[in-house]
Image: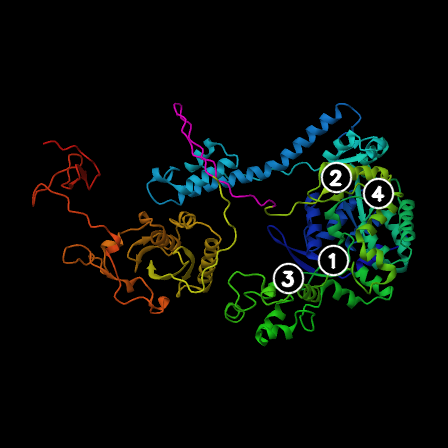
Amino acid sequence: MRFSFASLAALTPRPDREIERADHVAVVAAPESWTDAQIEAWLDLTDDLGLECAGDDPLGQMAASWSSRLGLSQVEATHLAATLILGIATPARTSGTLSGILDLSDPGAVRALEAVMARRRAERLASAAVEAASDALAGVTDAVSRCEGPQGDCADPSRNPALARAALSARKAGAKDADILRAIAGDSFATAPLPAPAALPVVALADRALIASGAPEALTAAAGAIDGDLILTFARETAEVIQTASRSAAAVLSLPALAAVAGDAFDVALADLVRLWSRALAGRRTGLVVIGLGGLADLAVLHDDVSGFVERVAMIVREAAEDVAVGLFVDDAEADLRLGLSPFSAVETWQTADGGVARRLRPSFAQAILGKGGDVDDAERHLFGRRTLVDAPGVDHATLRGRGFTDLELESVENALGHVERLEDCLRAPVLDPGFLRDVLGVEEGETELLARLAFDSTEIDAATTWAFGYGDLSAWKNAPENLLHALTEPTAFEAGIRQLLEAFSAVPDVAARPLPWQATTGQAARALSDASRDGRLAARLQRYQAPCGPLLDLPDVEPSRERRWEPDAKPVERVVEKVVERDRTRRKLPDRRKGYIQKAAVGGHKVYLHTGEYDDGELGEIFIDMHKEGAAFRSLMNNFAIAISIGLQYGVPLDEFVDAFVFTRFEPAGRVTGNDSIRSATSILDYIFRELGVSYLDRHELANVDPEGLNADGLGAGKGEDGLPGTVPAARFISKGFARGAAPDNLVVLPFGQKREQAAPTLGASEAVACPACGDFSLQQRGAGWICDTCGAAPSMQG
C-alpha cells in the first residue's frame, strides 16, 4: 500500500472523552475535532453490530474486531481500522431488501400498488389515531378522579360536566362507548407506540414514453410515489440493479477528511482507500464503494473546473474498485453523521467548547472564498449579521433613545441579540422590564408588535433585522466572487449538477427523492415524473416536504351535535333550528379605568390575594393572584397562570369553562379557608380561586360552603331591622369611592340584597308545628294551597 493510513492514525491525538449513554457514561478515545454526536453515532454502530468494546478505546477495538471478520491480512486490517479512526471512511447501510419489481403495464399491477399504498397510509394514520384515542380516554379517567363528591355523581356525565366533555372528545377520537365506560370505571388505557411502518419503497417499471406523455400509468405511479413510497424506473436492468444494491454492504468515503490528511497525495490516497475497502466489501457477498456527496461538493467548489474534478474523482474510484460496484448515492444519515458530513450548504452547525451548538461558515466555503479573492468576514456578516444595533439602518440606538430607551434598556437589548433570532424577541419581557414597557412605552401586556407600536415602518424593521441577524444564505451576497456565484446562489442546483455528473460513473442510478411542496397533489407529482422521464433520468423518486406543525385550517366554531342515549321506545322530539353565529375572535380589551374587587383569604394558612378586573358591563376580564410568603418560583408560576386566564377571558373563553376545569383540583396548600364569607374549605389554591369566581360572577352558589347572606363577620348571622328582616346596607360597601371619583352620593343604600319580602305563611297556631309524614321532622310549612317540607322537600297532601 503506497499510502500509510496506520502511521497517520498513530500520530492523531485522541484524548479521552466522556460520553453520556442511556445507562452509563462511556470514556472514549476520540479525535479532538469530533463532536459528541459523531462519537455517539460510532458507539451506536458498535451496539448494532453486537461488539463487546470494553476499555477506554471502544472505537479502535470495534475497528479491529470488525476488520478481523472480513478475512483481511493483519496489515490490511490495521489500515482499515486506521481509516475509521481518521474519520475518512465508515461502513454504511443500504436501504434493505426491496420487494419484487412491479410492472405497471400489467393489468393487475394497479390493484396491487393501490393495496400497498392503502396499507401504508393506514400504518401512518394508525399511530396518530391510537395516541389521540388513548389521550382522550385518559382524560375521561382524569375527569372522574378530579371530581369531589359522591362517586355516583362523579361517574355520571349528566352530573359531571367535565366528564361529559371528556367522554364526547373520546368518542370523537374513535373510542367506543364500551371503552369510555371502562375508563370511567378506572381502567388504564396507556398504549405503547406502534412500530414504525415499513419505509422501503416499491420498485416499479413503466414505459418512458407513456410516463412522458402523461398516460394513466403516470397518475398511478404518481399516487404511489408522492410520499417517497415508490421508485419509478424505465428499464428492467435498472430496476434489477437497484434491487441488488439494496442487498449490498457499503462503505462511505469522506473526501474532505481524506484531503485534510493526504494533502498533495490526494489521488494516491483515494485509490488506496478505495482498493482497501473494496477488498473488505468483496468478502460480504456484494458491496458498494460510495463517495459522500456532500463532501465531494465541498471539495468541488474549491476547483475552477468543477466538472473536471468530479470526473477525475469518479474515474479514480471506478478504476481502483476491485470486485465491487461503484455506487455514489447511498442514503445513510447515520454514516454521514459518523463522518461529520452534511448536505452541501454554505452554513454548518458545530459543537462549541461548552457543549452547545452554533452555526458557522462551512470551512470549504471559507477556503473557496479566500482562494477566489473574496472577503470571508463580509460573507459571515451577510450570513449571520452583526448581532448589534449599533449604526443599524432604521432601528439603532439613537432612534430607540428618542422613543424613551435609556442606557440600561439598550444594554439589555444588546446582550439579548446574541441569543435570539428575531428583533421583536429583544424588545419584550423579560429582556425589558415590564414596568418600563407599561409605564414608559405604553405597551399592553401580551402585545407583540412593539416596533410597529413605536412608529417604525416595515422597511426600517426589515433593514435593522438583516443588519442584526443577516440573510441566512449567500444567494444575495453582493461581493461574492464571480466564479463562485453558481455554487453560492443556487446550492441545490449545484449539487444536482454534481449528481448528474456522477451518475454516468455509478453502477447504481441516483434514487434521491426530488422534493415537492407539502401540499403537492397527485397531478403535480405526475408532472414531476413526466419531467424526469423526458430528462433521461434512469430512475425517479419523489417526496413531499413534511407539513408544518400546528393547525393548518381556520375552522369556524360550530355547535357540537347533542347525541342522545339510545332508548328503545324513544319518541321523535321536535327541535328548533337556530342560526349559528361565528364568535368574534378578536381580543376584547379592558377599559383603562376598570372596576373589580380584592379578596384576601388564607388557604391552609397560606395568604392569597385575588384581584379582579371587570368590563363596564360587570363581566370578568382579568385576575391577579398574589401569594407574598411563597417561594419565588411558585409566585411566578401563579402570576403567569393568572395572565394566561386573563388572556383567555379577553379572547372570549367563558368563565364557566375555567371554573369546571379547575375546581376540585388537589394539591398543597389545601384545607381550611379563612377570610372568605362564602368558602370555608378548598382542596387547593386553584380550587379556592375558581370557587370564589364561580360564586361571585356566575351565581354558582353550589360551589360555596355557606350562605354569605346569613352571616356577618363573626359568623353569628346578619343584623336585623326593627321588623325582623335584614336591614339596609350602605352602598359604600360595594361602590369604590376612588373609582367613582366621589361622584356617588354618600346617602346611597342597598336594599336587603334585592330580596323580596314575602308574607309569612299562615300556620296552624302560634306555637303549633306540623310533623312531615315522610321524614318525621317538624318542618312542614304551608305554601299557598299546598304543604312543603323544608327538610326533605316532600309535598304531602293534607286532609282535614
- Looking at the picture, how far across and down is residue 473, in whole percent? 75, 59
Residues shaded magenta: 552-578
Q: Closer to the N terminus: mark 3 or mark 2?
A: 3
Q: Which of the numbered marks, if any, corresponds to residue 422? A: 3
Disc 3 vs disc 2: Cβ atoms closer than 8 Å? no
Please give the residue where the numbered disc 4 appears in the rendered image.
327
Give, as a three-letter code, the residue at label 3: Arg
Give, as a three-letter code, the residue at label 2: Gln
Looking at the image, which is closer to me, 784 or 415? 784
Mark count: 4
Q: Quadrant of residue 327?
A: top right
CA distance for labels 4 and 1: 26 Å
Q: Closer to the N terminus: mark 1 or mark 2?
A: 1
- The single residue placed furthest to the bottom in the displayed view is 407
* Coloring applied to the structure: rainbow
CA distance for labels 1 and 2: 32 Å
Q: Closer to the N terminus: mark 4 or mark 2?
A: 4
Disc 4 vs disc 1: Cβ atoms closer than 8 Å? no
Residue occupying the point 39% across, 50% down: 666
- Of tags 3 and 4, which is closer to the observer? 3
- Looking at the picture, how far across and down is residue 150, in whole percent? 32, 41
CA distance for labels 4 and 2: 30 Å
Q: Is residue 405 above or below residue 64?
A: below
